[in-house]
Amino acid sequence: MTRYASVIGIKPESIAEYKRLHAAVWPDVLKQLKASNISNYSIYLKEPENLLFSYFEYHGSDYEADMAAMAADPRTQDWWAVCKPLQSPLDTRNDGEWWAEMPEVFHMD
């Protein structure tokens, strides 16, 4: 199992809509997350900075292939098309990132 964390901004005027969407995530999107070996997935909101923090655990053996399969899923693409306009990617993110990945610096079991 590998843990992943990332961060992205959210437009202040989009917070209510983002919360509404994530209160009832589309079942096909949840199914694809599980098929891509993702579990224990959470998103947190920090206000007034308007940052979303994401955490999940990956239980597969080929992360790149599983992420590519998720990105190719039409229903997931539809979900991202709804969510992405609400988000504000960080200027400091790496090339190719939407959510900026965050390395783990401490963990206690």
Image: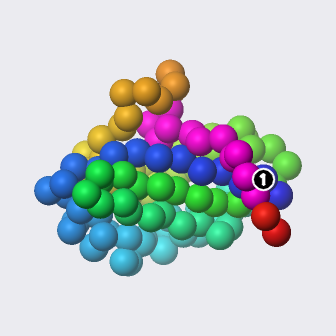
Quadrant of the rendered image containing residue 46: bottom left
What kind of secondary structure does the magenta stretch mostly adopt?
loop
Q: How many marks?
A: 1
Locate the N terminus and report the quarter of the image it occupies: bottom right
Task: Where is residue 37? Give x, y as percent.
Answer: 72, 60
Decide whether residue 17 is among the magenta residues.
Answer: no
Task: Classify 41 as above or below 75.
Answer: below
At horizontal 76% and vertical 58% (from top left) the residue drawn is 107
Q: Which residues are magenta?
A: 97-107
Q: Residue furthest left?
A: 13
What residue is shown at x 30% (from left), y 70% (from top)? Answer: 19
Of residues 82 and 39, the one nearer the viewer is 39
Q: Is residue 72 visible?
A: no
- Say whether residue 96 is left or right of residue 57: left
Query: Residue at position x 36%, y 77% from top?
Result: 23
Type of the residue with mark 1: Thr
**Image location (x, y in percent) of residue 26:** 42, 71
- Badge 1 is on which residue? 2
* Left/right of residue 28 with respect to residue 108 in the rendered view: left
Mark 1, secondary structure of its residue: strand
Give the percent coordinates (x, y) of residue 91: 36, 27
